Image: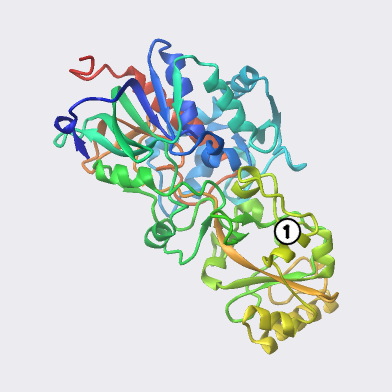
Amino acid sequence: MASLQSIRQWDLETDLLIAGYGLAGACAAIEAHDGDPGCEILVVDKCPVDLAGGNSRVAGQSLLISKNADALLEYQRAMSVPNPIPEDMLRAWTQAMVQLEPWIEERAREAGARYIKGTGFSEREVVREFPELGAEEAVAYTATILPIPSGVWLAFKANVERRPRIRVQHDTRVVDLVQDADTLEVFGAIVEQGGTRRSIKARRAVVMATGGFEGDLQMQRDYFGLAEAWPLGAPHNTGDGLRILQKAGAEMWHLRGFGQSGGIWPGFKVPEYDAIFMRNFFWQTFSWIEIDAENRRFYNETAELQLTHYKEKRHGHWVDTPHCRAWPVHMLFDEVTRANNCLIIKVMSWNPVVAGYEWSDDNSAEIAKGWIVKADSIAELAQELGRDPAAVERAVSEYNAACAAGQDAAFGRNPQTLQPIAQPPFYAIRIDPAIVCTGGGAKRNIESEVIAHDGRAIPRLYEAGELGSMFSNLYQNGSYLTECMISGRAAGRNGVRQPAWPGAAT
């Protein structure tokens, strides 16, 4: 931390300083402005303006809507059994959830956007991930704000831009907090702009909403034990806030849970991009399999695992699919699947939505780039991959035999998806673990106050969004964006209620 005595002069001043301009940061700014229209609010973000929005911009834009607080309480408690959420926080969160929809609708109206029931990119009106745990009663429906992609983020960004007392400063990375070494009280922050460090006085409070660490591979290895994993969302989510809050004396939580709450999805990582492409989960044909490091199939590839955030039930528990333990993994497919399916989802994730990469509908451009390997036979394909040709041929033959029999005895694929890999040429693409987000960070309470090692709130310090998320195990679709709203609103509301610290006005 930087001490107050180390600051010779403040380069900038504001009442409330918000670090991070995703949905949580936007909600904090909106709530702070509306709670005290006279206050000055400064939002700083490490990204240039064209890359702003973080994971909120490239998520599926799903919003969980619940009308039954008691059922939602039981459902979330059941999803959190391996690492229980504090009961007082859980109860307050459920009450906030059932009261949230009118506020979301008002934000959509203010932005001139359309709020709808459903996901916006499929015909499903609701996704209930774990019915046996109570989803039917807890989840009324899924909602979103159009357009897709990015509709929720765009609506809240428009709300921020309509509020005159909110300033947003891009290309500004928070690197430290200014604190009292004994009490940990926060007085401002040190930021970096173009290689130069500047101090910002926060007369009332600082809100940390800088996202997670999914863009830092070493942190993935150290904090979650993943040898290789890549972000579906913002590649600049590299754990800045987590490091700062550790240094600030915060207690950490949810860094290594029973599973990645958002799941470990199949993705395509290519050298040209820092983020990873999300593999499609809407298939027209099914003449494809995946093989692991031992050249064998290892799970039910065509199960609708997107409906459980890539969790499958093993030994009575919902756990991450084994991609991150089976690596290297390759998807093998034939000409029929190549010609009839775009391999990626285009309506979410960083590369298509923000980086603007337009994956070809028939995958021909990606074959030409060498991202997809092509060969005239399975044996030749295996050689191109550096795999044992006989073993790969055996895996394909066993799968094709299951197709002929109309039954997948090994993994129970739906018989309707048992289509043989038979039409040359043949193709392969490496599957890498794709991370939605990371929930670990500083422990916080429902008021978004950051908790120190002694269990007390750190004065004038708040946290919101993915950084330090309350979710500790399983995740219900639509919960992360609504948690951004609830935690962001609490941080903004409570931050501007703080009186200016002594000497702040001088």
**Residue 43 in the image: x percent, y percent?**
42, 27
- The single residue placed furthest to the top in the displayed view is 38
Three-letter code for the amino acid on which mark 1 is drawn = Leu
**Residue 416 in the image: x percent, y percent?**
83, 65
Frontmost residue, 199 versus 493: 199
Quadrant where the C terminus sits is: top left
- The single residue placed furthest to the bottom in the displayed view is 390
How many numbered marks, from 0 up?
1
Frontmost residue, 489 versus 132: 489
Residue 271 position (above or below residue 91): below
Quadrant where the N terminus sits is: top left
Residue 95 seen in the current view: no
- Residue at 53% in and 55% down: 274
Element on which disc 1 rests: loop
Residue 130 position (above or below residue 331): above
Residue at the disc numbered 1? 343
- Residue at 38% in and 58% down: 223
Q: Is residue 500 left or right of residue 260?
A: left
Q: Is residue 256 left or right of residue 362?
A: left
- Residue at 67% in and 57% down: 279
Residue 286 position (above or below residue 397): above
Frontmost residue, 311 versus 163: 163
Q: Is residue 19 left or right of residue 357?
A: left
**Residue 198 in the image: x percent, y percent?**
29, 32
**Residue 245 in the image: x percent, y percent?**
30, 42
Figure quadrant of residue 409: bottom right
- Residue at 48% in and 57% down: 259
Residue 240 seen in the current view: yes
Residue 163 position (above or below residue 92): above
Q: Circle 1: is it few (<14), some (14-19), or many (20+) Cα within 10 Å?
A: many
